[in-house]
Amino acid sequence: MDDIRGKAQGAAPTPLSVLDLATVGSGQTSTDALHAAVRIARTADRRGFTRHWVAEHHSMPGVASSSPAVILAHLAAHTERVRLGSGGVMLPNHAPLVIAEQFGTLEALAPGRVDLGLGRAPGTDGATAAALRRTDRLHEGADDFPEQLAELIRFLDDDFPDGHPYRRIHAVPGPVQATTAGGVQSPHRPQIWLLGSSGFSARLAGMMGLPFSFAHHFSARNTIPALDLYRESFRPSAVLDAPYAMIGVSAFAADEAKEARRQVLTGALNMVRLRRGAPGLVPTPEEAEAHSFSAIERDFVDDWLSNVVHGTPDEVRAGLDDLQKRTGADELMLTANAHTQDARVRSYELIADAYGMPELG
């Protein structure tokens, strides 16, 4: 299997990667958002970022990434080097066989470049999750996550034991094609990651010897405890001989600190609306500046922005360096939350420049 570990570029303390939600801003269409996703993926590909992941969310007007596999197939046609993956697929929403088929297809389209990041949360509200899963017993999906994960891995490896009811079922594209007359074995398979914002997936990833990605960008208080639990629980496997932990980080750079603050305030207002149960399109900077925050909202915004690394390129570099030292993360996955698409692309360019990352052409 391909090496999971990325390679740090320039002066970056760890490999840097990108998480994209294909956000839709006020005055924009989903087509605009998905075109922006291509621009960001091309930037990541050209500037030496290790991965470009797409998140699964549902029933949110401001997020166009409800179908990660479809978006990733499109991005595969527009990139050459960067690893493409899900950050993540919410496995309880899907049949494991379907995910094995989707990501086997992606692996065939972009050999050696596919990550399958998996989570157990619904990625939406309870009513939408019930519609996705066709049941209102949502806790059962989360409780069954380890069994669903084991089934998915069996499909990806095509190794159900004799006597198993799925022994004659094969995920295609997949290994069964190599055992068919005239078949050739692909040297690649989607790399599985476990994602989490608490201790459950951290412990499971450690016990299974899998790489782990923690959602620091919306659960910062749990980051170090979860990473400690992952490392303490880790058992070497055929996949990894030592723990490999990545954290998601909200990071935004602009030429001036004032402009960076102006842009990230749009994401903060968007989160305020989400917490009120009224998700919408990402507001413009002008909307965010004009919004009258209540005292409770202002406290929330201040707390939220304290975990967003933002400012000039040098300030963002210093903030990322400090975060990596505090957490010991093996990789940082950056997400730029802002209304303006040009500003998001520019942010990734500025961060790459701050670390002296290469222009790969």
Image (cartoon, grey):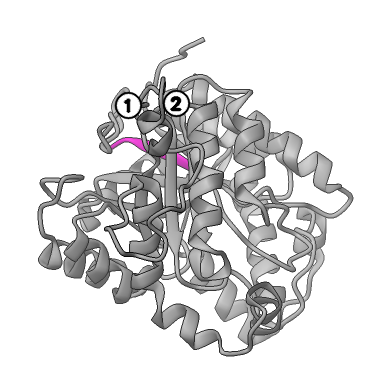
Foreground pick, 99 / 280: 99
43 vs 265: above or below: above
Residue drawn 75% across and 62% down?
288
Q: Outermost residue, bottom direction?
A: 137
Q: Does the residue at mark 2 contact the one at mark 1 (Cβ under 8 Å)?
A: yes
Task: Judge whether 112 appears above or below 69 on screen.
Answer: above
Of tags 2 and 1, the one toward the viewer is 1
* x and y, in percent, of residue 283 in the image: 78, 59
Mark 1 residue crowding within 10 angstroms, few (<14) / some (14–19) / many (20+): few
Tell me the SS state at disc 1. Answer: loop
Q: Is residue 107 above or below residue 287?
A: above
Q: Which residue is mark 2?
A: 111
Of all residues, the one furthest to the right in this rendering is 27
Q: What is the C-alpha distance between the residues marked 2 and 1?
A: 9 Å
**Which x, y percent locates residue 316?**
43, 43
Is residue 29 shown left or right of residue 352? right
The residue indicated by pointer 1 is 187
The residue range painted magenta reads 13-18
Dot 1 amino acid type: Pro
* Residue for point 31% across, 75% down: 200
Question: Does residue 142 appear anywhere in the picture?
Answer: yes
Give SS at disc 2.
loop
The answer to whether residue 70 is above or below residue 245 is above
Is residue 307 visible from the viewing direction of this image? no
